[in-house]
Amino acid sequence: MSRNFKLGEIENQTKIKLAKFSGQNSRLFTFVDDINQIFINKIEFSKNLSDLSIQNPFYKQFGISQNEISSIIFSQSENELVNGSNKGIITYWDISTQKIIQNIKAHLSGISCLSVFPNDNNLLISGGMDSQIKIWDSRQQNNGLTLRSHKLSINSMMVSKDGKLLASGSNDGSVKIWEMNTQKQLVSFNESDWPICCVQFNPVDKAVAACSDDGCIRYWDVDRLSLISQTIPDKQCIYQIKFCENGQQLFSAQNFSLKAWDMERDGLLLDYIDSQWKYILDLNVFDSKDIIGLTTQNSTGLSIFGTKMNNINNEKHIYRNHSEKVHGCQISDQGYERHSVNVLKPKNNQIQSYGNILEKQGFQLCSNNSNKFLPTSQVAQRINYESVIQEEDIKQSCLDLIISHDEVNLSSFVIDDSNKQKFKQMDQINDISKDHSKVIQILNQRINYMKPIMHWWSNNNIKSAVNAINQLSEPSILFDALLMCAQSSKYKSIPMEQLPQLLEKCKILIDSKYLSHIRGGLLFCYRTFTTYRDDIQTIKSFNQMSKVDLSREERIAKYDKIVEQLKQIIQMSKLTKLIERNKMEVSELAKKLQIEMQSLLKRINQQ
């Protein structure tokens, strides 16, 4: 039984194109249809998702925009609603009066995303299809900030929980981190060649996650400016990613699936849930580990789905130590500039005259005609002192002994030959301890990856176990997982459509330099071959004499994919070299698989 279930549906006369929750743990959400009508609604439930109810909209029709709405967001206080249009106009709505407060001409082209500051209700960030990021203060209508660095449209932005950093993701494949009080780009992460569709800051750790159109999630340490982990690319597009409140799990929503990850542990897949949803517009994670998604299942409706995630193994989370300040790389000519805005329809005549709010927030603006920011303050540099060594105080024999070693160890400092052997033994013990620590680290990693897989496998949740295996790339962990499957009585429970992916993983093992890995890969391949050999031959011969049957055609297509993978495996150069050696048990297994597979292919082709 699926843990992801439909909670309700909102009917509408036209297709819904946008939906957005107000914030984490918030039950308030808004949605926009194709004729730019805006609605606000609220989800109500007590302890159980089954108690969920959808309130009637506060207003039958909250408002309708004269411009094509391309993005929408709640203000931090939930008193205002802000939307961006495909003409580059930002519109502020007063929720209590349902009236427009003001319109701002913000971008030269469409506004693709909006973000709010968690600690300031008046600041708003807009990302445009013109590749620019702009920062606005709703109380000051004639000034804005422009951040230029991306080359293509901005798809997603998020401000960190403390309001100090901004992350932006673009169609150019880069994720950029900006320091807000200095208007400085700290770093640009360019590991992806695919458009970035969503960025998320970890709420408790100085790290940011981003998913791209290749179905891969990457996770960076913002303090050290380095990649921590990434998941294996997935054929299914990821629509949304969200951290839970404690930052320990990251959830990703795709068509028909919801996944939970531990990005601190090499992108470890913690949970996989089959779902009925598709075309996910937004996702919200509640502190009770309930997840609710807004989707456009039907042509004229908004479907609401819920998922219980309470069974995730919540082990102690390892946090990295960070310095107080992120030290960014020096980047020249950022192209920051002040930007004057054109106010189209100010609806509130009682707007007071405020000082330069952006300066109060720490933004440094200059008043000359060059429209450049003032230089940032000089950061004090640490002075390195060189110690002065008097050569005559050190015996030359000792120096010669030290510099003659590739590594400095205890015995390097001992001149007395009588004691040197004792210290060499201590060095050997230290080396063994280091190796032992590495072994323990590797074993712990393998255990951490295998625990959820074995849990799902033992509880007959075969599909989730196989999905987790398909996320693996480390040969030692793949060996554990595939050997478990090959030697299990539940092997035949593996869905046929998932076997080709597992056979693809076998190629990683067969290409390994370790015989144990090669043997594990071959054992899984041979188990697959012997399990389905007779079925493949029978259905192929039966197909020649029978009428067209759609269900049988689908089954044949699945068998064909298995056959194609096995065919590629027996043609691998590594397999040929193993067979040529003809001295080991692995060589015999490789030869046996190749001969029997070639025989099957010959019989199939003769039919």
Image: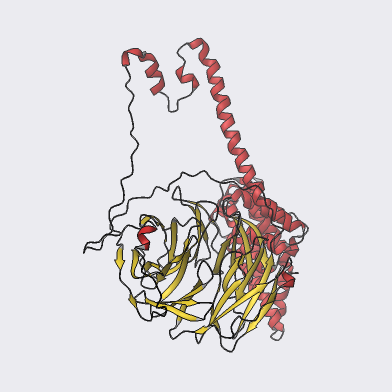
Left/right of residue 381 with respect to residue 541 in the rendered view: left
Residue 593 x, y percent position in the rendering: 66, 58
Q: How is the image coloured?
A: secondary structure
Q: Residue at x 44, y 83 (%)?
A: 68
Q: Nearer the viewer, residue 269 or 249?
A: 249
Residue displayed at 31% across by 62% down: 336
**Quadrant (top left, top right, bottom left, bottom right) of the C terminus:** bottom right
Rendered location of residue 559, percent (x, y) = 66, 71
218 shown above or below 172? above
Q: Nearest the camera: 198 or 588? A: 198
- Residue 217 visible at all: yes
In the image, taking residue 293 as reference, residue 487 lies left or right, namely right
Query: Residue 503: horizontal and vertical position, in percent?
Result: 62, 61
- Please state if 590 lies on the left or on the right of 362 as rendered: right
Q: Quadrant of residue 486?
A: bottom right
Badge count: 0
**Picture quadrant of residue 192:** bottom left
Farthest residue toward the left?
369
Image quarter of the N terminus: bottom right
Residue 178: image location, x then y, percent? 40, 57
The residue that appears at 36% across and 14% down in the rendered structure is 394
Name the quadrant containing residue 58.
bottom right
> Which is nearer the eye, 45 or 585?
45
Report whether residue 275 is seen: no
Name, please, the residue furthest toward the bottom: 13
